[in-house]
Image: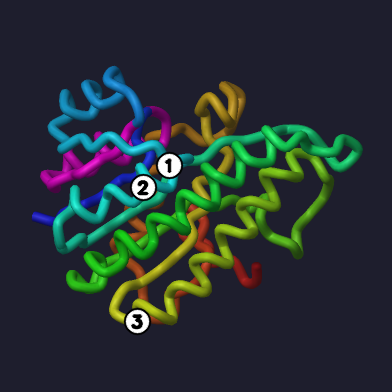
Amino acid sequence: MATVLIIGASRGIGLEFVRQYRDAGQRVIATARDDDAMARLRELGAEALRVDVAEPASVSSLTWSLDGEALDIALYVAGVIDRADARHPPTRDAFDRLMHTNVLGALQAIPQVLPGVESANGVFGVLSSTMSLIGQVPASNAWLYRISKAALNMAVASARHDYPRARCIALDPGWVQTDMGGRTAPVSVGDSVAGMRHVIATLGPDDNGSLIHHDGRRATSW
């Protein structure tokens, strides 16, 4: 039985990761911010931890909560979006909200979590996006979100050097039918998560430090 940590599992993709890994018989530790979300996680059979990824002190609590656990898989799924484009300067509140959740939370989690991933020779993944790829920018919509996900890619590409026994990757879930993606998105939550689980299960040594799409395609560049 593998031990899987999902950071940001209140709903959507994170909650579906919990559901699918539990259905596969794995032990799942999952984080959420509020009582209702933690109750949903427990109903699925997960061990629920209260963590607010936008608060560094809360993320730091993972160290004592995990208490040296070996983690076969650890995923940073938490993320928010702002849809403004480059014609609109971001407010400080919008900038802080996105950067704290999408980037700072991951930077805080990496030193807390990756030692446990290394001890299991496991996989650490963050949820990125094709919108992070500098070589593929068709428009400036959601530019703050794009910037935050590009920064997250750099976090993974950098951190892998300090944790050589862990495989560190960025995962693109696709355009998914979630609150963020909307109902008209072409990929269901279940299909996206199933695809990413397959990617995680079939990683090769050359995949370390790369971005991989939910359908298994490897990004040729950042």
Q: CA distance from mark 3 to mark 2?
A: 23 Å
Element type where label 2 sits in the image: helix
Quarter the N terminus occupies: bottom left
The residue segment tinted magenta is: 11-32
| Mark 3: secondary structure | loop
Please provide percent x and percent y for residue 181: 58, 31
Location of residue 109 in the rendering, given as x and y in whole percent from the top left corner: 38, 55
Residue linked to disc 3: 164
Marked residue nearer the N-terminal end (1 or 3): 1
The CA span between labels 1 and 3 is: 25 Å
Whole-percent x, y for residue 208 in the image = 43, 75
Look at the image and tell me whether residue 15 can be seen.
no
Name the mark on residue 59.
2
Q: With respect to residue 93, does 130 lie above or below?
A: below
- Indicate yes or no whether the magenta region holds residue 25: yes
Please report the residue visible at 61 percent of the width from the left and 53 percent of the height from the top. Answer: 149
Q: Is residue 72 magenta?
A: no
Relative horizontal placement of residue 218, taking residue 18 as reference (left or right): right
Instruction: Assess whether mark 3 and mark 1 are in contact (beta carbons under 8 angstroms).
Output: no
Residue beneath the point at 19% across and 72% down: 119
- Quarter of the image for residue 86 reads top right
- Amino acid type of the residue that numbered disc 3 sits on in the rendered structure: Pro
Local crowd at mark 3 within 10 Å, few (<14), some, or many (≥20)?
few
How far across and down, in percent of the image, does residue 10 sit? Answer: 36, 29
> Is 189 positioned to the left or the right of 201 in the image?
right
Measure the alpha-carbon separation of dots 2 and 1. Answer: 6 Å
Residue extending farthest right: 87
Tell me which label, 3 or 2, sits earlier in the chain.
2
Residue contact between numbered discs 2 and 1, judged by CB atoms under 8 Å: yes
Query: Residue 53: which numbered mark, if any?
Result: 1
Q: Is residue 95 visible?
A: yes
